[in-house]
Image: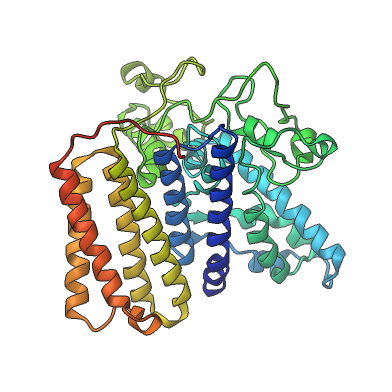
């Protein structure tokens, strides 16, 4: 986990710079693909994901080293061939993992967050899950284990493979000629994120599109069918925690409500969207999108001042997370969990404020007060003061500003505009 945290120290600023570049480019060419609330929600989702992963929250059902030890038929040494075979194995496994996530009810719950944005841009690439609490990906790497691909090679390639999927989440790059027959491109991935009937569940490849072409899931982007983005059951919230578990909550309700014990069990493993007949008749879902060209995208009231506050919270949260990663090895498990929980609560709080729900105010007030009391009663904010001069003062001022701001917004709810494009 420490190695992963160090990698994120470089990856997070790099991704943020690319986001700034895309937003700036959209402004220059007068073709902005970002909306402030949506992009903040997307980035915040990415932050929750890396908090969860860096703290090791979850249960690995089986590990790749275990499979390698018990299934390996060959012993091969590190060479370019090994790296190539490992890359193919990881990409092949990624395709089938992705396909399962789209086709099976319970697996869709851990993937729906990635599709929940009604925009398509680099920020939505950061919508990654916290609901994937059980790690089973190693099962899909059995071919690599049989071939004896070393664990060290897989450990290096896996995060690189994940990060390499970031760039093609954009509308500013058109089709790429002959590369369209080899790799996953922005055009192909726009199809994948679209809810048009022609595009649903297509282009499931991660870096190579050859698997889609082999297994019948490839679809070219059509000039006469502009992609529309989101999910057919809209999330209607900016809160990434809620988005992560909405589908699971629906499944749980349906499993409880159905009178069929068989359906109570099989609903989890049926095709995505399947519901027991008795539940579907009695509890229809009314907000399903039927016309992809006329549905109303989710928006919440806002103002320029509130937008500035939300951007401030996002940047502050990112800074606090980078601070956590820079001190990862110096903190014990309890400190890591407390610090990570504090950041997580902040994300939950300000995204709840974005939704306009009343408990967002109380979460932010409570977090600010508890944080300030902690700072006044302890010599350090974990090891912030050792890292930078005025560290405790800076954190205290951040918490105080948060406290004052949420009080202001709570008692001045006369916001005067809706969600605006980032400019």
Looking at the picture, tell me which residue is in the foreground, 407 or 117.
Answer: 407
113 lies left or right of 178: left
Which residue appears at 29% of the width and 44% of the height?
Answer: 306
61 up-or-down from 106: above or below: below
* Residue drawn at x 31%, y 78% as measured from the top left: 390
Q: From what the image shows, is residue 1 above or below residue 268?
A: below
Residue at the spot 70% in from the left edge and 26% down from the top edge: 221
Q: Position of residue 116 (x, y in %)?
A: 47, 36
- In the picture provided, is 198 more to the left or to the right than 312? right
Quarter of the figure with residue 206: top right
Along the viewing direction, whichever of 315 and 242 lies nearer the viewer: 315
- Colour option used: rainbow
In the rendered image, residue 96, in percent from the top left (x then y), is placed at 66, 43
User: In this rendering, does residue 58 appear at all?
Assistant: no
Q: Nearer the viewer, residue 154 or 139?
A: 154
Residue 355 vertical position relative to residue 141 in the rendered view, above or below = above
Asked if one can make out residue 351 in the rendered structure from this viewpoint, the answer is yes
Pinpoint residue 164: horizontal percent, then vertical percent.
67, 53
Occupied quadrant, residue 328: bottom left
**Residue sticking out furthest to the front:** 28
Give coordinates of residue 287: x percent, y percent: 37, 21
Which residue: 43% across, 61% down? Answer: 51
- Out of 35 and 182, give the one closest to the viewer: 35
């Amino acid at each position: 986990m420490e190695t992963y945290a160090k990698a994120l120290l470089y990856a997070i600023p790099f991704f943020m710079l690319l986001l700034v570049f895309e937003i700036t480019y959209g402004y220059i060419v007068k073709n902005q693909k970002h909306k402030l609330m949506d992009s903040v929600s997307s980035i915040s989702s990415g932050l929750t994901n890396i908090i969860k992963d860096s703290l090791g929250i979850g249960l690995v059902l089986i590990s790749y080293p275990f499979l390698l030890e018990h299934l390996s038929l060959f012993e091969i040494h590190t060479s370019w061939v090994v790296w190539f075979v490992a890359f193919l194995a990881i990409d092949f496994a990624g395709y089938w993992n992705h396909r399962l996530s789209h086709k099976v009810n319970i697996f869709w719950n851990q993937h729906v967050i990635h599709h929940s944005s009604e925009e398509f841009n680099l920020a939505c690439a950061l919508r990654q899950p916290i609901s994937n609490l059980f790690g089973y990906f190693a099962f899909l790497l059995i071919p690599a284990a049989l071939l004896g691909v070393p664990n060290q090679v897989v450990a290096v390639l896996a995060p690189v493979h994940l990060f390499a999927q970031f760039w093609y989440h954009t509308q500013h790059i058109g089709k790429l000629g002959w590369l369209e027959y080899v790799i996953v491109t922005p055009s192909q991935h726009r199809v994948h994120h679209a809810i048009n009937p022609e595009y649903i569940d297509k282009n499931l490849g991660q870096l190579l599109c050859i698997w889609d072409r082999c297994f019948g899931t490839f679809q070219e982007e059509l000039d006469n069918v502009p992609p529309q983005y989101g999910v057919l059951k809209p999330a209607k919230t900016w809160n990434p925690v809620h988005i992560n578990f909405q589908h699971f909550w629906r499944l749980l309700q349906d499993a409880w409500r159905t009178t069929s014990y068989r359906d109570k069990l099989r609903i989890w493993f049926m095709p995505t969207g399947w519901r027991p007949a008795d539940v579907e008749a009695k509890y229809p879902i009314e907000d399903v999108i039927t016309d992809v060209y006329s549905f109303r995208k989710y928006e919440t009231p806002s103002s320029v001042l509130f937008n500035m506050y939300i951007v401030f919270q996002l940047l502050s949260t990112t800074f606090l997370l980078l601070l956590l990663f820079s001190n990862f090895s110096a903190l014990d498990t309890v400190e890591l969990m407390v610090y990570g929980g504090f950041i997580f609560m902040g994300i939950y709080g300000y995204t709840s404020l974005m939704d306009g729900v009343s408990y967002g105010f109380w979460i932010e007030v409570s977090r600010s007060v508890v944080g300030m009391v902690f700072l006044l009663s302890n010599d350090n904010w974990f090891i912030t003061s050792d890292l930078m001069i005025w560290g405790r003062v800076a954190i205290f001022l951040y918490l105080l500003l948060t406290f004052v701001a949420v009080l202001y917004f709570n008692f001045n709810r006369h916001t005067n505009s809706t969600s605006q494009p980032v400019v």
